[in-house]
Image (cartoon, grey):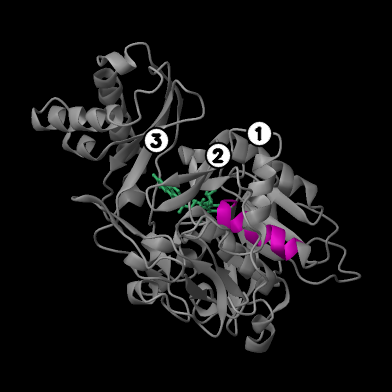
């Protein structure tokens, strides 16, 4: 493949004159990677955003997540200033179906995944300093004296060799760090379960509310007990969608420790289960005229976390711990998807938040390598809270600012979130909800 020539002096093959500040290279255009790119670009950096898939959007758009968690605190106010609030405004603009929604004790933003994809694509395109490379991957990385000095990107554009100022690992599954040193990854022997989501239309309106929705779940569990559906279907979750006749169905997909080597097989099996669930549902009166309208790809909740300068622990999350080098806040419960027992939700104290320190987003041993999103440096239970979409956006935003300029601890301090006392009151939510 030819080496692409861009005229950028930081690209090997560029003219080498008038060197501009070295670019920030972000791997992965999901929630964290897009936020990192936007904030780095707004700090003046040139950003190369490298995405393995055809389009940006990540898990939210590919897996079909329609309840964005981690944006609000326990009273439904924005949890932190920054890109999360801007994301909400952009999603809401011209789309009345996007709304703040209460789920038990929690608040989420209900937004169609297709709308999310369209909005983030337009947003990235509007930032002149971000170049998006779809269908691309980081193929080689050279490190010298504790820094990433060069890396190569391969994709339809050809091969590009870059001298990055900083690199952000936001692949969600720690692919870049794994390529540098697999010893820097925390993989669990027993991974938290993944999922597969699909949408159906033609459902009898109102049938997913109380008590109809609960009866549906009972019917699925009874079918499992009678051997009519596979055991994993006992953990199926069914939710309302954006039309009165729409349902989102979330299947439970346990992942073996070596899921990377058998992703195709796991996906085929999950699709087989999906067909069985659809056949079962469409025999029920509420789904008699329903059909599948959209299917998401296999979703991985925890594909390995990096070893950072600090490992965020479940205790930090439970104690709502604050840090001197805080990057952002989180307050979502510890939502752990046990591969056998299913989901457990451990609520955190209301009206408070924990902080994620920059050290949990700084990869150990490499001064210009950051991480953000679900592969942050955390134990499995802390990650089960911090991985939600709003928190991934907040981590990405903080890391983007740091990667764009802050090299030292003191410079990083300028990128920190302000603590609640120093903070301006957060914008309140309009009384009629979002
Ligand atoms: C089934 C399921 C249900 C969920 N439900 C919810 C929910 O209801 N609410 C909520 O808030 N959160 C939910 N989550 C969690 C949340 O969606 C994710 O944790 C979050 O979106 C992760 O964001 P991220 O940016 O870290 O990673 P991702 O969004 O996964 O982005 C990573 C990106 O990197 C790309 N990539 C991977 N490898 C490479 C590579 N080598 N080179 C370049 N690019 C690469 C991927 O294609 C992807 O676009 C759910 C997750 C799953 C799996």
First in sequence, mark 3 or 1: give its number: 1
Q: Quadrant of the C terminus?
A: top right
What's drawn in magenta, residue-wise? Answer: 29-41
Residue occupying image coordinates x 59% and y 71%: 142
Give residue 84's position: percent from left, percent from top.
Answer: 62, 56
Left or right side of 66 for 3 = right
First in sequence, mark 1 or 2: give its number: 1
Give residue 91's position: percent from left, percent from top.
Answer: 65, 42
138 or 229: which is nearer to us? 229
Which residue lies under the disc numbered 2?
111
Pointer 1 with pointer 2, Cβ within 8 A: yes
Which residue lies under the disc numbered 3?
197
Classify mark 3 as within 8 Å of ligand 1 or not, answering yes or no. Answer: yes
Give residue 192's position: percent from left, percent from top.
Answer: 30, 55
* Crowd band around label 1 with a 10 angstrom C-alpha radius: few (<14), some (14–19), many (20+): few
Left or right side of 373 for 145 = right
Q: Is residue 1 in view? A: no
């Amino acid at each position: 493949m030819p080496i692409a020539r861009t005229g950028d002096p930081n690209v090997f093959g560029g003219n080498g004159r008038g060197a501009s500040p070295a670019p920030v290279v972000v791997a992965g255009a999901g929630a964290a990677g897009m936020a990192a790119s936007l904030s780095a670009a707004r700090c003046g950096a040139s950003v190369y955003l490298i995405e393995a898939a055809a389009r940006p959007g990540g898990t939210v758009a590919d897996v079909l997540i329609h309840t964005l968690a981690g944006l609000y605190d326990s009273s439904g106010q924005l949890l932190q200033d920054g890109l999360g609030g801007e994301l909400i405004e952009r999603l809401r603009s011209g789309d009345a179906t996007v709304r703040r929604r209460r789920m038990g004790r929690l608040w989420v933003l209900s937004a169609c995944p297709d709308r999310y994809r369209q909005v983030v694509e337009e947003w990235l395109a509007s930032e002149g300093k971000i170049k998006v490379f779809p269908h691309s991957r980081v193929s080689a990385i050279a490190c010298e004296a504790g820094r990433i000095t060069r890396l190569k990107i391969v994709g339809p554009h050809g091969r590009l060799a870059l001298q990055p100022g900083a690199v952000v690992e936001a692949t969600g599954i720690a692919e870049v760090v794994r390529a540098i040193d697999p010893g820097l990854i925390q993989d669990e022997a027993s991974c938290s379960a993944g999922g597969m989501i699909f949408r159906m239309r033609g459902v009898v309106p109102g049938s997913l509310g109380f008590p109809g929705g609960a009866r549906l779940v009972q019917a699925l569990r009874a079918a499992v007990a009678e051997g009519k559906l596979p055991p994993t279907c006992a953990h199926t979750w069914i939710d309302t969608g954006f039309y009165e006749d729409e349902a989102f169905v979330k299947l439970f997909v346990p992942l073996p420790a070596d899921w990377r080597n058998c992703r195709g097989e796991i996906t085929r099996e999950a699709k087989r289960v999906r067909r069985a669930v659809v056949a079962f549902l469409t025999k029920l009166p509420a789904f008699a005229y329903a059909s599948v309208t959209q299917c998401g790809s296999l979703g991985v909740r925890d594909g390995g976390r990096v070893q950072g300068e600090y490992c965020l622990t479940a205790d930090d999350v439970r104690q709502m711990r604050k840090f001197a080098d805080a990057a952002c806040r989180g307050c979502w419960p510890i939502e752990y998807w046990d591969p056998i027992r299913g989901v457990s939700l451990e609520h955190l104290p209301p009206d408070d938040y924990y902080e994620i320190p920059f050290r949990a987003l700084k990869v150990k041993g490499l001064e210009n390598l950051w991480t953000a999103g679900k592969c942050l440096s955390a134990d499995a239970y802390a990650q089960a809270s911090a991985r939600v979409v709003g928190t991934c956006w907040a981590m990405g935003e903080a890391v983007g600012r740091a990667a764009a300029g802050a090299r030292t601890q003191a410079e990083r301090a300028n990128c920190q979130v302000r603590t609640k006392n120093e903070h301006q009151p957060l914008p309140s939510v309009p009384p009629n909800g979002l």
